[in-house]
Image: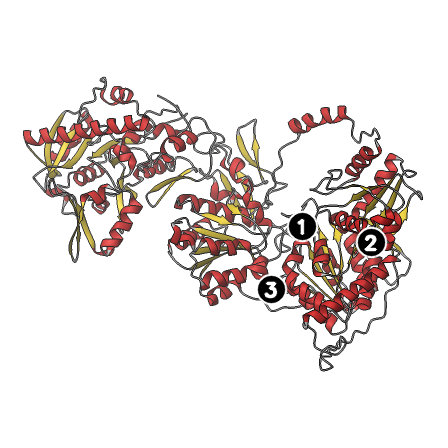
Amino acid sequence: MQMGGSKELKEQVLDKDLCTVCGACVDLCPYFKAYNGKVAQIFECDLTQGRCFAHCPKTGVDFEQLAQNYFQQPYRGDALGFYRRITAARAGEKLGSGQFQNGGTVSALVTMALESGLIEGAVLTDSEGVKPVPRLVTQAGEVLDCASTKYMAAPTISCLNQAAGKGLRNLGVVGTACQLTGVAQSRLNPTRKEGFEDPVALTIGLFCTWSLDARKFQDLLADRVDTSTITGMDVPPPPAEIFVIRTHNGTVEIPLPEIRAIVPKGCSVCPDMTAEWADVSVGALEGSSGWNTLIIRTEKGEQLVEKAVSEGYLILDAFPDSSLENLTLGAGNKKKRAQEKADMEEE
Amino acid sequence: MNLIAKQEKDGRYLLMGNEAIARGALEAGVAVAAGYPGTPSSEIIENLARVTTERDLYVEWSTNEKVAMEVAAAGSFAELRSLCILKQNGVNVASDFFLHLAGSGTRGGMVIIPCEDPGALSSINEGDSRHFSRMLEVPLIEPGNFQEAKDMTKWAFELSETLRCPVMLRSVTRLSHASGNVVFGELPVTHHKARFQHDGFILDPDTGMISSAPVAYRHGLQQEKLQKAIELFETSPFNTYTGPENPELLVITSSACNLYTKEAIQLLDVGDRVGLLKLGTTWPLPPKLLGKYLATTDKILIVEEVIPFLEENVKILAAETAETIGIKKFYGKRDGSIPSVNELNPDLVITALANILELNYEGVAAAYTEKALPLAFLNAPVRDLTFCPGCPHRASFWNIRTVLKKDNREGFVCGDIGCYSLAMLPTGFSTTKTMHAMGSGTGIASGFGQLARFGMDQPVLSVCGDSTFFHAVMPALVNAVHHKSDITLIVLDNSGTAMTGFQPHPGLEVDAQGSEALKLDIQAICESMGATVQVTDPFDFKATQNALFEMLQIKSGVKVLVLKQSCALSPEKKHTRRFEMSVDSASCLGEDCGCNRLCTRIFRCPGLVWDKVNGISKIDDAICSGCGVCASICPVGAIEKREVA
């Protein structure tokens, strides 16, 4: 694995517009900070090796090393990554009702993990108005505040960095592929920092095909709707080709090409749709709103799901073969496109 | 009793050039003195302000140099002797009024004293105001030593009254700020009586209205005055010659260069080969006097600082009299004998003399230089220009830089003149990106704030100090508000004209004489202009950064953030500490990833030192001013502050 410091991170990622604002480099030190959907270097740091560079998911990820460490297997490059099984899931009655994007599976798992003491805190993404903001939740009752997809890049991992810096351990993290790739790298202590302790006890991945540039998306929203009236957002399955904004005054549709135009460049080189470096990954289940696709990847993930089901937080159902086919195809295409884009960038 | 107001005639005292000038003005019975602080001029007003009661004077620090000249002119119009003090670029500020004043003429003796800064020791320009004398057609005189600084100041008032026009007396740093022996003259008994006569015949210089119009008539009068000045200058005792009757080389010089040249001639021991014509009256030049000395030799060297002003004027006279004095070989700035930039010193004059006279002179031995240079380079610690410990500007620019970087739209700050000019350097985190004249930051920002129509999407900020705000920022701010420029002005209000030594300004309750003055409120002024205004303490990072973030989100119009915290050297703060500071060596991360010496590498307050041996930061107890700000920057809270009871 290539090593570098903040200078290399700035040159190779920020200056090339490849940052997806995952927050992996933010708040580890006084130099990298996030503000309103952008990451910036405030002052120069002259260390030639830094965690900022080592944790970043865009500086070159050593998939082989991650595969060996988290799955004790060689990396194969499968469309969906390593997994034990895939199932349909939704929140059970124990959770209560919330503003879920789909089936509430993530909220159910995090709530259960907090209530049962599996984790002492969860790093989630809340919102202020339409702005996504990282949030450390320590009370199960606060989990539902953070439900539903934000669609915008958020520096969620900065919140993990802050919490770890304060000495907190046994944390759960919910994030997309870039965020959890950053987390997976950080947990291996790549810079061999003295006295390192892994602060993470659980990772829950979120499916993600792209996110949106937060500032551009906020401007676009402000142009089309009174943002204070927004109740939710959604991308209906193909062939709809629209982005739907639900408000108190009805729905507003935006053609998908307009939305794709404000996807950060960094998303186009991301090979990971289903957040492969997580204990479990959760996304929509095509054709069944109210249900999620749940990929169980690790033994810890398996135990979590079993416990959630047995305690009534989660309900599982069979995962249709046709859905697996589509999911594999979608994730494989993202890998292929990312590879092509990355090759083009290198040329 | 203040030294410069001592009655004792013929007493000999060691005086700073600026004190000598102030004494000269007192000996002339000056009644009104006004100026704007600026190095190296400030001590003249300061010294006069201390003796206002005993010498029956009015002294003020004016809002800016133009106003200072106008205030002084009023004294002259009311038949009093008056003085206007400014630094070189201050003459530019005052020049519009100066042009008209030269045309209108004066009544009571009026002397304008620019103290200039060749080499820009305390300036960001090497302005030379001598050209103003030729451009505006007023007489220029230049003292060549400390005694002359006093004597010529006194004479300047008499000259002004004889000619009925303002007289420029130019000083430079090495005269204003160096000291020499001065023999005192008599102090007059003063009973100033001011009266402005204005009802007489319109063209009567004593009783009519005062104006530069009718222009052709008054301009003609002005040139007659200059002719009269030339006659007086032909026999002035301040123009002196020393040297052989027919020198091999004639050096013509003035001002502090006179001292350098005398030293050079002495060190080279060429007093029998070189003649020295020291001119005290440098414009208009007396042609007969010049002709007399030019005729004595074929080689002429002109020694002066900054612009070849004297050189060009001498050459004009030499061309006009070539028939009688013959063709000369000139040495000076135009042929490279004398450097064209930076101040001079005896060594540079020696080099010029040695080259012309073909002498082998080694001012500094080459072997010494060869040995000394690398030693100095390798062994001397790096000492960058830096804000003082506890300086509020360090905190202000930390906040501004942090917000602009986080905001991440390539916003920038237009700088201005004050201690905070240093913000273009690492001590201010290289935050300011333009820097010109007083008030120019906000004027430039006002222009940038109009460029959104051409696609500029960067936030535009400007900074100014509290004194600069009154001096020249207010008109720029009016312009920005009126034209709805999208800018944020940050007023770094440290409660005084700190850079030049805490002179009062219109934002304070006291004037130059120590009397109670009416205080103008910057926040209220900006609000009344229609700007959105907030006031925070720059030591409060959270409040300051939040306010600035908020202002950057307001998409149109002028926003003003007043950062209020007095200068660490201000009389009320100096020698007091609000906090005792300490570093917890166990938690200090030092050079580790996660900090990498943020406090001693980036923040760099001189009160923080890097302990290389132990790899931790420490407080330098002798230097720390106890402001407590560094506790806010440490990423792990290792810098601790304890309030001093």
Mark 2 crowd level (few <14, some 14–19, many ≥20, 10 Å Cα): many
The amino acid marked with disc number 1 is Gly
In which quarter of the view is residue B224 placed? bottom right
Q: Is residue B573 visible?
A: yes
The amino acid marked with disc number 2 is Gly
Which residue in the structure is indicated by mark 3?
B506
Picture quarter with the N terminus of chain A: top left
Give the left or right position of residue A48, taking residue B94 as reference. Answer: left
Q: Mark 3 vs mark 1: give the one in front.
A: 1
The amino acid marked with disc number 3 is Pro
Which residue in the structure is indicated by mark 1?
B127
Q: Secondary structure at mark 3?
A: loop
State the image coordinates of residue A192 (x, y, percent, origin top left): 39, 23
Q: Earlier in the sequence, mark 2 or mark 3?
A: 2
Q: Badge 1 sits on which subunit?
A: B
Which residue in the structure is indicated by mark 2?
B280
Q: Is residue B164 above or below residue B588?
A: below
